[in-house]
Image: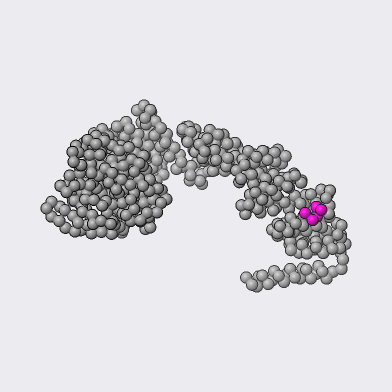
């Protein structure tokens, strides 16, 4: 590095030495050598040559103009701007001095833009436009206005510039970027129709930008115009085959389209969407790329109660997917939910659902041997409670990928979950309803849902009120069935062991108030976990354990 720097310095020194050693040159000689240095882009030597020439020919305007060119190309923008202003003072009515100052202003404006000094960029570009109305002045004025979110003014300037300089390579894509940024702001404000109009203008100007087409399609989707959104996402897949964002968005749009029809669509319409998604899923090679289409199938047939079509459709994908493990788990879960929504699950359906979910977890654990066991956790409850469901039990939410989950509910000294006089008719009949739930770990809250109603009379919903905490080790502690609007933490909040997360309730798939708790890995497959030593009552026997808890054990927390 030092040798290279020395050689460069020595070369410059020789160039300067030769320049200053010569007697005064003629103007033609200065011009010829200046052109040669410009061709070779030797800006340092050009600077030296022009400084010498200005001393000998102070009234030759082309020399300070050429000096300014050398300064700009060395990225010495402040010096170039100062020198150009001095030149303009000397030749106030000259077109060349105006043009030189304009170039210096726009070069400096560009540098201020790159440094995110957008007000300064706009001021310099505005001065340049007033001075010589150059292409670059329109470019940097428009860019500065866009970054300052003065979108209407930016559009006016850029459109004017494009009319004057239709061959400029930057004005058209920059105008497209302004329309796109404006559209994004309108979309964030909920003005979806206006956002879509702006995205359409942006894409008409610059159809080579994948993000513009993506934002247009997303806006259409947010407006509920699913057919238009699907067509645009498909166009994105064809036009931008190297971009992966359109493929996932297309599947998600199909899922949202189905969900928009679940309450108002006919059985034929809903099942038609499922059949369409089945064809899409069959063309995908892995579960991740087919996931949203698989969810369309599952949710559609749960709504229509068509167990045979659910079975035939999902299981037909076993051979087309490179790894059907996640498909098995999803099918088992959806089959159970479909029957449970009708009433008690028939034994054969439950047996089949458990079979597929356990098959999935067995395959996953075989492929991911050596998964950790999370140890020494604190209990999430402080009052005496009973274990209603244990690891890998016959409850559907405790098998498959949810194998390592518990259900807990508070009980009194006699083992009853009911308050005095409670008759199992209302959530408030249970001691567990409103019981504080504490964090088992420290970490960051990554998800909160708190608005689901609490069930009563033995009924239940689908999604419960939930808190998820990401631990420092990258695992996820999952708590659900909270009481509506009782959650006491927010997404992004740091929590410690023992932080109150909320109050236990009866939301989601819960017919009686309880806490469902799991630990998950980064693939959202449950991990085995163990608590610190706890006191247990099993029948008439009392003992301490750190082993996995069993159904019907009564647990006596030791306190914080």
Is any atom of residue 458 visible in this view? no
Q: Let me know if residue 86 is in the magenta part.
A: yes
Q: Which residues are magenta?
A: 85-89
Above/below status of 200 relative to 16: above
The location of residue 13, given as percent across then percent down, is 75, 70
Q: Indicate whether 44 appears above or below 94.
A: below
Name the quarter where the N terminus is drawn.
Answer: bottom right
Confirm whether the magenta stretch covers residue 493.
Answer: no
Q: Is residue 61 visible?
A: yes
For image coordinates 80% across by 69% down, the residue present is 18
Q: Position of residue 26 (x, y in %)?
A: 88, 62
Apparent side of residue 121 relative to residue 296 in the rendered image (left or right)? right
Residue, x 48% and y 44% (percent of image)? 245
The foreground one among 141 and 261 is: 141
The structure residue drawn at horizontal position 25% and vertical position 38%, both measured from the top left corner, is 427
- Name the residue at the front extreme: 420
Residue appearing at x 22%, y 49% in the figure: 385
Question: In which quadrant will I find the C terminus?
Answer: bottom left
Pick the front one: 198 or 545: 545
Residue 142 horizontal side relative to residue 278, left or right: right
Image-quadrant location for residue 167: top right
Residue 254 percent across, percent down from the top left: 42, 36
State the residue in front, 334 or 412. 412
Q: Quadrant of residue 543?
A: bottom left
Rendering coords of residue 170 (x, y %):
66, 45
Q: Is residue 263 above or below residue 373?
A: above
How many marks can you see? 0
Q: Where is 104 relative to 130, above or below?
A: below
Q: Does the magenta stretch mainly form a helix, a strand or a loop?
A: helix
């Amino acid at each position: 590095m030092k040798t290279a720097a020395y050689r460069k310095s020595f070369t410059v020194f020789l160039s300067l030495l030769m320049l200053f050693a010569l007697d005064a040159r003629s103007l033609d000689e200065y011009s010829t050598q200046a052109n040669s240095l410009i061709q070779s882009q030797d800006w340092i030597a050009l600077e030296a040559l022009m400084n010498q020439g200005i001393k000998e020919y102070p009234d030759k305007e082309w020399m300070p103009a050429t000096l300014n060119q050398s300064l700009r190309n060395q990225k010495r923008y402040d010096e170039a701007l100062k020198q150009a202003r001095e030149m303009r003072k000397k030749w106030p009515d000259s077109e060349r001095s105006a043009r030189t100052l304009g170039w210096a202003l726009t070069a400096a404006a560009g540098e201020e833009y790159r440094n995110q000094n957008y007000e300064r960029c706009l001021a310099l570009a505005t001065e340049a436009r007033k001075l010589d109305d150059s292409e670059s002045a329109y470019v940097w004025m428009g860019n500065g206005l866009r970054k300052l979110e003065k979108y209407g003014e930016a559009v006016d300037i850029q459109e004017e510039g494009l009319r004057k300089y239709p061959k400029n390579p930057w004005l058209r894509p920059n105008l497209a970027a302004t329309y796109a940024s404006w559209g994004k702001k309108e979309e964030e404000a909920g003005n979806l129709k206006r956002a879509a109009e702006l995205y359409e203008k942006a894409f008409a100007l610059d159809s080579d930008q994948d993000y513009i087409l993506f934002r247009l399609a997303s806006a259409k989707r947010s407006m509920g115009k699913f057919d238009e959104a699907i067509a645009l996402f498909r166009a994105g897949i064809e036009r931008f085959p190297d971009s992966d964002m359109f493929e996932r968005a297309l599947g998600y749009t199909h899922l949202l389209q189905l969900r928009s029809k679940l309450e108002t669509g006919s059985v034929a319409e809903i099942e038609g969407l499922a059949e369409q998604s089945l064809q899409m899923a069959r063309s995908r090679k892995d579960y991740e790329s087919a996931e949203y289409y698989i969810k369309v199938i599952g949710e559609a047939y749960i709504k229509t109660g068509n167990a045979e079509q659910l079975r035939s459709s999902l299981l037909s994908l076993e051979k087309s997917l490179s790894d059907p493990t996640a498909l098995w788990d999803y099918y088992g879960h959806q089959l159970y939910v479909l029957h449970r929504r009708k009433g008690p699950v028939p034994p054969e359906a439950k047996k089949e659902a458990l079979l597929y979910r356990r098959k999935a977890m067995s395959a996953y654990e075989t492929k991911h041997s050596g998964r950790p066991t999370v140890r020494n956790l604190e209990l999430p409850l402080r009052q005496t409670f009973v274990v209603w469901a244990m690891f890998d039990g016959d409850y559907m939410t405790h098998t498959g990928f949810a194998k390592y989950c518990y259900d807990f509910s508070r009980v009194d000294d006699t083992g009853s979950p009911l308050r005095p006089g409670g008759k199992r008719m209302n959530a408030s009949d249970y001691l567990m309803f409103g019981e504080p739930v504490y964090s088992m770990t420290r970490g960051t809250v990554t998800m909160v849902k708190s608005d689901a109603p609490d069930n009563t009379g033995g009924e239940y919903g689908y999604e419960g009120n939930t808190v998820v905490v990401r631990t420092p080790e990258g695992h996820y502690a999952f708590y659900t069935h909270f009481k509506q609007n009782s959650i006491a933490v927010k997404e992004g909040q740091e929590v410690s062991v023992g932080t109150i997360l909320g109050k236990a309730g009866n939301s989601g798939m819960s017919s009686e108030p309880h806490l469902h708790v799991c630990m998950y890995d980064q693939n959202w497959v449950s991990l085995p976990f163990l608590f610190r030593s706890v006191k247990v009552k099993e029948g008439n026997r009392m003992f301490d354990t750190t082993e996995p808890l069993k159904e019907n054990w009564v647990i006596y927390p030791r306190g914080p």
